[in-house]
Image: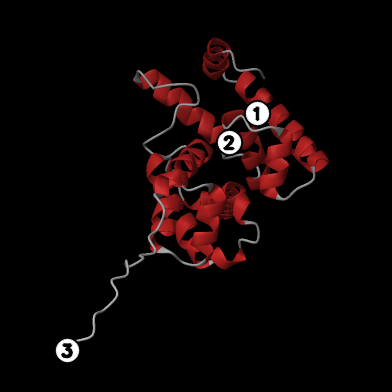
């Protein structure tokens, strides 16, 4: 006679609904290399990283390429995430480091070409005509004249609307250093914009303080 087997339910360990996972849960899973966490990290943070890069670089195509590079490096270095609950800060600090490197690279090779990206990002809405596109091209031309760190501080503060403290935290700088860099960059940009009547009128219309 065949012995009777006790029927026991089979317990399956399933990944949580990725969209419902907290940053802490996502961070822990990312460190462990869980596939769902890698996918969710991209889904959750890539749009903001791309927007940050678009505003800092002025080019949508370059921003998308940079975001790919950011997350490629981030996933390779996921074990350096020491505080899983601070995953968001980890992602943005990583993105800013990569962006800073790209700005330095761009500055170093600037003398090789006068090419400007064709796809510019408006700092205050959609570009509606060729005149506006030309103004934004000139604006990003002025940003190109800033040193990489100054440009990034300026972009994070004025284009991303981060606080000085947030900029300092993401760039691993002191608040006083950020304030000095921001003051220098803002003074230079204000002078350059004032020298361009079209740009000055454009930003006056936008209500952007200079």
Q: Which residue is mark 1?
A: 189
Cα gap from disc 1 to disc 3, whole angstroms: 90 Å
Write the residue at 51% across / 39% down: 52
Q: Which is more N-terminal, label 2 or label 3?
A: 3
Lateral position of residue 69 relative to residue 23, left or right = left
The answer to whether mark 1 and mark 2 are in CB contact below 8 A is yes
Residue farthest along the front direction in this orientation: 1
Residue farthest along the bottom direction in this orientation: 1
Lateral position of residue 132 relative to residue 22, left or right = left
Q: Which is more N-terminal, label 2 or label 1?
A: 2
Q: Which residue is mark 3?
A: 1
The answer to whether mark 3 and mark 2 are in CB contact below 8 A is no
Disc 2 is placed on an element classified as helix
Residue 210, disc:
none
Write the residue at 26% across / 79% down: 5
Position in image of residue 158 (x %, y %): 62, 29
30 and 207: which is toward the camera:
30
Position in image of residue 11 (x %, y %): 36, 66
As drawn, 99 above or below 74: above
Q: Which is more N-terminal, label 3 or label 1?
A: 3
Judge depth for marks 1 and 3 and give the one in front: 3
Position in image of residue 22 (x %, y %): 52, 47
Q: Which residue is mark 2?
A: 143
Lateral position of residue 39 relative to residue 161, left or right = left
Cα gap from disc 3 to disc 2, whole angstroms: 85 Å
Disc 3 is placed on an element classified as loop
193 and 1: which is toward the camera:
1
């Amino acid at each position: 006679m065949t012995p009777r087997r006790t029927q026991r339910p089979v317990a399956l360990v399933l990944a949580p609904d990725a969209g419902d996972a907290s940053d802490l849960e996502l961070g822990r899973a990312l460190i462990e290399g869980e596939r769902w966490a890698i996918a969710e990290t991209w889904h959750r943070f890539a749009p903001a990283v791309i927007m940050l890069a678009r505003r800092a670089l002025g080019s949508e195509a370059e921003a998308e390429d940079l975001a790919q590079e950011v997350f490629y490096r981030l996933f390779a270095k996921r074990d350096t995430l020491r505080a899983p609950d601070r995953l968001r800060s980890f992602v943005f600090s990583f993105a800013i480091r990569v962006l800073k490197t790209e700005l330095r690279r761009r500055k170093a090779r600037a003398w090789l070409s006068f090419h400007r990206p064709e796809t510019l990002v408006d700092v205050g809405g959609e570009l509606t005509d060729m005149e506006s596109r030309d103004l934004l091209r000139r604006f990003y031309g002025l940003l190109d004249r800033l040193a990489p760190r100054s440009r990034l501080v300026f972009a994070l503060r004025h284009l991303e609307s981060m606080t000085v403290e947030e900029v300092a935290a993401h760039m691993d700088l002191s608040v006083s250093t950020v304030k000095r860099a921001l003051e220098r960059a803002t003074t230079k940009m204000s002078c350059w914009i004032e020298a361009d009547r079209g740009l000055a009128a454009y930003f006056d219309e936008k209500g952007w303080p200079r």
